[in-house]
């Protein structure tokens, strides 16, 4: 089915319907055990072209693909902002989707000039990078913003679990969430890939023209350097992770004036940036 993505400024909240998990039959490691069903996360292959030029093929969760394409385009420096995306057309197949994206001439020229083949995976976000300059790019320095109030982190893991509709039924999914200035979870995006989840969130927030310098963004995954790149390019104010960051990640957050906070399981939140 061929469908054109409609442009909208409406922001989908955390209670919006999520793609249904797939039910798979299994039995325990016992010949006498009865067969049961488990709900497992679904995934599809997504191929993205820009003005007819193939750029990436990756495995993603099937929901919120328009958000993912917008966020992927911004956070990978293919477009400067959403005004350079003119059209998105999705062609759906049984286990795959083709996304044909029309972008501005300026963005397309820059893409061809600096193009690299990127075969996305749910693990390494640097697959296909051909030069150190691309792995460690020059990024703009952000304008500092105040840290979120400490009270916003009370019970945050439980609130994240409530917002993760897909993970509750199927598991095996990362999430990226935006919390507003009052500490309320406004939007949640989930995916098998941690980079994909953040890209989906960035796309949703930019489409709705939400000022992400206010409030904070949470990722449930390991906070890798690539996520810092995406956060800085999307001009997020505060990035919060549930897993500890690496030393290099902290250095980049400090250098680019991105607030970076880690929320451990049993200890108080830790502020790594600003120092």
Image (cartoon, helix red, strand yellow):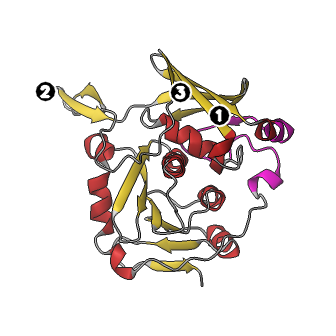
Q: Total number of numbered labels?
A: 3
Residue, disc 2: 34
Residue 155 at x, y percent in the picture: 28, 70
State the image coordinates of residue 90 (x, y, percent, origin top left).
53, 24
Chain-order first, disc 1 or disc 3: 3
Give the residue at the far right of this rendering. 113
Residue tagged 3: 45
Which of the pair 270/105 is nearer the observer?
105
Q: Secondary structure at mark 2?
A: loop
Q: Are marks 1 and 2 in contact (CB under 8 Å)?
A: no
Placement of 33 over or under 203, stated as above or below: above
The disc, 3 or 2, on the residue closer to the chain's N-terminal end is 2
Please tell me which residue is depicted at 67% across the width and 70% down the height of the picture: 142
Disc 1 designates what residue?
86
| Disc 3 crowd, CA 10 A, few/some/many (<14, 14-19, 20+) | some
Say whether residue 76 is magenta: no
């Amino acid at each position: 089915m061929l469908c054109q993505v409609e442009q909208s400024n409406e922001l989908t909240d955390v209670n919006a319907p999520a793609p249904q998990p797939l039910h798979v039959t299994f039995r325990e490691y016992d010949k006498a055990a009865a067969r049961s069903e488990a709900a497992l996360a679904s995934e599809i292959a997504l191929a993205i072209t820009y003005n007819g030029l193939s750029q990436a093929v990756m495995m993603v969760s099937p929901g919120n693909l328009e958000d993912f394409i917008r966020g992927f385009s911004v956070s990978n420096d293919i477009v400067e902002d959403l005004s350079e995306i003119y059209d998105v057309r999705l062609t759906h197949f049984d286990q795959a989707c083709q996304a044909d994206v029309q972008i501005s001439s300026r963005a397309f020229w820059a893409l061809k000039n600096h193009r690299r083949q990127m075969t996305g995976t749910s693990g390494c976000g640097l697959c296909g990078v051909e030069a150190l300059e691309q792995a460690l790019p020059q990024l703009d320095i952000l304008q500092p913003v105040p840290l979120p109030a400490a009270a916003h982190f009370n019970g945050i893991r439980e609130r994240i679990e409530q917002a993760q509709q897909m993970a509750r039924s199927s598991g095996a999914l990362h999430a990226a969430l935006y919390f507003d200035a009052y500490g309320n979870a406004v939007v949640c995006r989930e995916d098998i890939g941690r980079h994909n989840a953040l890209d989906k969130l960035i796309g949703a927030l930019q489409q709705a023209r939400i000022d992400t310098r206010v409030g904070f963004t949470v990722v449930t995954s390991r906070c890798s350097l690539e996520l810092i790149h995406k956060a800085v390019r999307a001009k997020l104010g505060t990035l919060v992770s549930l897993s500890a960051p690496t030393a290099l990640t902290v250095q980049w957050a400090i250098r680019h004036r991105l607030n970076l906070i880690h929320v451990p399981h049993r200890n108080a939140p830790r502020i790594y940036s600003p120092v």
